[in-house]
Image (spheres, coloured by chain):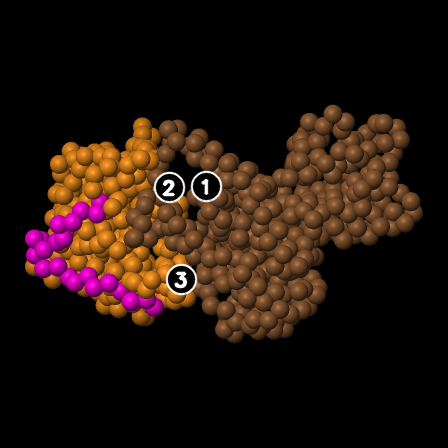
Chain colours: A orange, B brown
């Protein structure tokens, strides 16, 4: 395994690096939380980083020929290829450095994918990447809960009942998206016991985001971070509320913030306070009713949603994380 | 796979090996950096051999067992972008599973070298050779070469990295090896020494196109209608340039290793003064040569032209080789349903290539050997008889004939 860079944890938001490595030159929407995620990600990683971007908003909206926001080397990869792109890049660097064909140096390799590319199409390749302990790489799934680049179609990350162009509420059927959101980070953590770091994150908490990226890049081996990114266009709200919605997702207990380091789970931020009973979960309705994509919900729909969230906190083995409970012996 | 013996190939030797093993040895000699494997018959014999070479310490590479063919090809594509020499491969529907990655590899101008162990496409399942798998990349910017012997497999693999990685070219290279007949059949192969290969094959230098923090470029941004046509045109130019690079590299090859044909693109067998010339690709060269030799002994003016490079297609050389014949009988180990004359892919390419000639030979197409069915000497004899009949009557009764097929 090649060595890793010295990227210390940052204390205090003022100590986050000033240097912008994701700068002007993109054309993401106003209030795009995923663009912020890109900016925070590369700020934390620093200039000696290669970024691979699979198809999605953060490809199409960010990189239009003759302009690029990326100060670091950046390369497009296919929709389902974040895992294989990271593996290939890390393997190429590692092989050439070992054989003396390239100067020895720890270079960060980060591949990002959206929820469609990561949680649906790219799941197999991400799983493959997470099995290669010998490569240092990070896969970041920026989850705006739909195929937002192609017109807001439902993905495996879209919440139950949300209005998307593939799940529009109609005269006959109100709830077209009957799938519950995939529980991505735990699925990867549980399924790949050798992976040393899996975390969830949210751009509303910049310092936490910065430090999670740094932990992922310095712990060694393949790592995974899943971030929840409010999307004004796909979720249908005023762009100025992006940050607030990210916080709300956590405060209602729908999104849970945590790190799994060497198999040890640590909840953090509001999620930790909720789990410890210091803080009460806000009603899910407060979150849902702020977004046009849930405007068609009836009180029963909201109750169904609330019941599911309650269940995850009250019945799951690891509340909010692992959807398994101990079976009752006869 | 039979007992595998590996060793360091520091001295030039003679080995009894299969086509797959020959390509595996080429990987070691070329000091490939990243190799990706996924199992599918028959190509994967090369990966089994490479795995053994790596396990025995015969050479150092990152050998990655991917979780799908798609990842196999994406991994080498990205390794190539940072400057690593790469090798991958597949067969049949496995090659098709990787197709998204395969097409972007050419679009991105990554000089990946891949072995296609030609196999019939599912369904229904068949392990044997058909050329439709590799043929599918013919329009995408890949070099596409059909090998006939284990020796040629080793030699062409070395040529492949040299040509593909040339800064004037930077296009991937598919080395097509007929399933079983080549991948699994052993023959005596002259294995060059590491030293010779080092002299022949320079390091892969991506220069200003290398993805590295010292060269922070953005690769493959969205271009849309503004620029896509110009970029396609650049790839077209590279494909035009590669013919010259291949000639140059082949001359160097012959000088260094002391073997090779007069042309890197085609092989002519008894074509001079031939009235009927058979054309085909891959291992069917063997029965065809035997049939041609016997017919020549019987006084019949027959020849055989083997197309080695399908892409780039050596139009002028092929025109010169076939222009004087009265009839050309094209053997396709592939099919193109609903195509002109309901024939094979090679046939249509050849008919198109010969169209500009003022005097064109009669053109007949024979679909043969699909799914690994053996092409027999008597099948070749029949093709020649049918072609002779067309010459005698001045009339082609049936352009496309399926050979040795139950009707």
> Which of the marked residues, 2 or 1, is nearer the chain's N terminus?
1
Q: Which residues are magenta?
A: A1-22
User: Are the numbered discs 2 and 3 placed on the same chain, yes or no?
Assistant: no
**Residue A8 on the magenta segment:** yes
Q: Main secondary structure of the magenta part?
A: loop
Q: Is residue B326 left or right of residue A71?
A: right
Q: CA separation, marks 1 and 3? A: 26 Å
Residue B343 appears in the picture as rendered: no
Who's the residue at 25% across and 46% down the image? A71
Which class describes the residues within 10 Å of circle 2: few (<14), some (14-19), or many (20+)? some
Q: Quadrant of the N terminus of chain B?
A: bottom right
User: Are the numbered discs 1 and 3 placed on the same chain, yes or no?
Assistant: no
Residue A150 x %, y %: 34, 35
Q: CA separation, marks 2 and 3? A: 25 Å
Chain name for mark 2? B
Who's the residue at 74% across and 50% down the image? B285
User: Are the numbered discs 2 and 1 placed on the same chain, yes or no?
Assistant: yes
Which class describes the residues within 10 Å of circle 3: few (<14), some (14-19), or many (20+)? some
Q: Is residue B387 left or right of residue A197?
A: right
Disc 3 target residue: A101
Residue A17 appears in the picture as rendered: yes
Disc 1 target residue: B107
Q: Nearer the viewer, residue A33 or B51?
A: B51
Chain name for mark 3? A
Residue B356 x %, y %: 69, 27
Disc 2 target residue: B220
Quadrant in the rendering for residue B223: top left
Instruction: Give the residue furthest to the top.
Output: B358
Of badges 2 and 3, nearer the viewer stands: 3
């Amino acid at each position: 395994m090649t060595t890793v860079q010295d990227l210390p944890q940052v204390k205090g938001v003022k100590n986050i690096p000033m240097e912008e490595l994701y700068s002007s030159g993109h054309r993401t929407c106003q209030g795009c939380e995923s663009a912020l995620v890109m900016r925070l990600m590369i700020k934390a990683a620093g200039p000696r980083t290669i970024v691979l971007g699979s198809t999605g908003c953060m490809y199409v909206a960010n990189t239009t020929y003759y302009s690029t926001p990326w100060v670091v080397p950046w390369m497009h990869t296919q929709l389902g290829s974040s895992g294989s792109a990271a593996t290939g890049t890390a393997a190429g660097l590692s092989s050439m450095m070992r054989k003396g064909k390239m100067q020895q140096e720890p270079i960060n390799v980060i591949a990002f994918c959206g929820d469609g590319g990561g949680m649906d199409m790219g799941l197999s390749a991400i799983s493959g990447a997470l099995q290669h302990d010998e490569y240092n790489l990070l896969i970041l799934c920026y989850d705006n809960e739909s195929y937002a680049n192609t017109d807001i179609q439902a993905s495996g990350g879209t919440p139950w009942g949300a209005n998307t162009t593939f799940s529009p509420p109609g005269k006959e059927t109100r709830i077209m998206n009957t799938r519950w959101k995939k529980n991505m980070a735990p699925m990867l953590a549980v399924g790949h016991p050798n992976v040393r770091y899996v975390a969830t994150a949210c751009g509303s908490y910049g310092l936490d985001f910065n430090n999670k990226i740094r932990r992922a890049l310095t712990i060694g081996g393949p790592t995974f971070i899943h971030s929840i990114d409010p999307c004004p266009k796909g979720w249908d709200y005023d762009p100025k509320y992006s940050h607030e919605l990210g916080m709300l997702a956590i405060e209602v207990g729908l999104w849970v913030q945590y790190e799994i380091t060497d198999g040890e789970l640590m909840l953090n931020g509001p999620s930790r306070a909720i789990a410890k009973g210091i803080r009460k979960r806000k009603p899910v309705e407060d979150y849902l009713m702020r977004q046009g994509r849930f405007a068609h919900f009836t009180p029963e729909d909201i109750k169904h949603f609330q019941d599911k969230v309650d269940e995850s906190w009250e019945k799951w083995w690891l509340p909010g994380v692992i959807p398994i409970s101990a079976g009752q012996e006869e | 796979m039979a007992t595998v013996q590996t060793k360091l190939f520091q001295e030039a030797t003679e080995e009894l090996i299969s086509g797959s093993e020959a390509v595996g040895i080429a990987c070691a000699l070329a000091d490939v950096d990243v190799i990706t494997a996924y199992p599918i018959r028959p190509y994967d014999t090369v990966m089994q051999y490479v795995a053994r070479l790596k396990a025995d310490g015969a050479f150092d590479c990152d050998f990655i067992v991917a979780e799908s063919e798609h990842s196999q090809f994406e991994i080498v594509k990205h390794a190539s972008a940072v400057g690593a020499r790469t090798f991958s491969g597949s067969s049949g529907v496995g090659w098709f599973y990787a197709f998204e990655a395969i097409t972007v590899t050419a679009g991105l101008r990554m000089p990946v070298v891949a072995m296609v162990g030609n196999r019939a496409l599912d369904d229904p399942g068949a392990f044997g050779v058909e050329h439709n798998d590799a043929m599918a990349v013919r329009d995408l910017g890949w070099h596409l070469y059909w090998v006939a012997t284990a020796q040629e497999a080793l030699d062409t693999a070395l040529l492949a990295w040299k040509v593909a990685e040339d800064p004037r070219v930077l296009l991937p290279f598919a080395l097509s090896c007929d399933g079983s007949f080549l991948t699994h059949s052993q023959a005596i192969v002259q294995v060059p020494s590491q030293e010779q290969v080092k002299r022949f094959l320079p390091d892969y230098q991506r220069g200003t196109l290398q993805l590295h923090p010292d060269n922070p470029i953005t690769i493959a941004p969205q271009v849309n209608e503004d620029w896509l046509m110009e970029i396609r045109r650049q790839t077209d130019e590279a494909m035009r340039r590669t013919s010259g690079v291949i000639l140059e590299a082949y001359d160097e090859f012959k000088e260094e290793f002391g073997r090779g044909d007069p042309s890197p693109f085609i092989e002519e067998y008894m074509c001079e003064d031939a009235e009927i010339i058979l054309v085909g690709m891959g291992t069917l060269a063997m029965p065809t040569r035997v049939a041609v030799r016997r017919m020549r002994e019987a006084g019949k003016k027959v020849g055989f032209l083997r197309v080695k490079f399908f892409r780039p297609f050596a139009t002028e050389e092929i025109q010169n080789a076939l222009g004087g014949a009265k009839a050309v009988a094209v053997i396709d180990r592939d099919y193109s349903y609903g195509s002109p004359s309901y024939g094979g892919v090679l046939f249509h390419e050849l008919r198109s290539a010969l169209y500009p000639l003022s005097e064109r030979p009669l053109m007949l197409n024979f679909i043969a050997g699909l799914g690994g069915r053996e092409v027999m000497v008597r099948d070749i004899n029949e093709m020649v008889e049918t072609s002779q009949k067309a010459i005698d009557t001045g009339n082609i009764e049936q352009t496309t004939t399926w050979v040795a097929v139950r009707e």
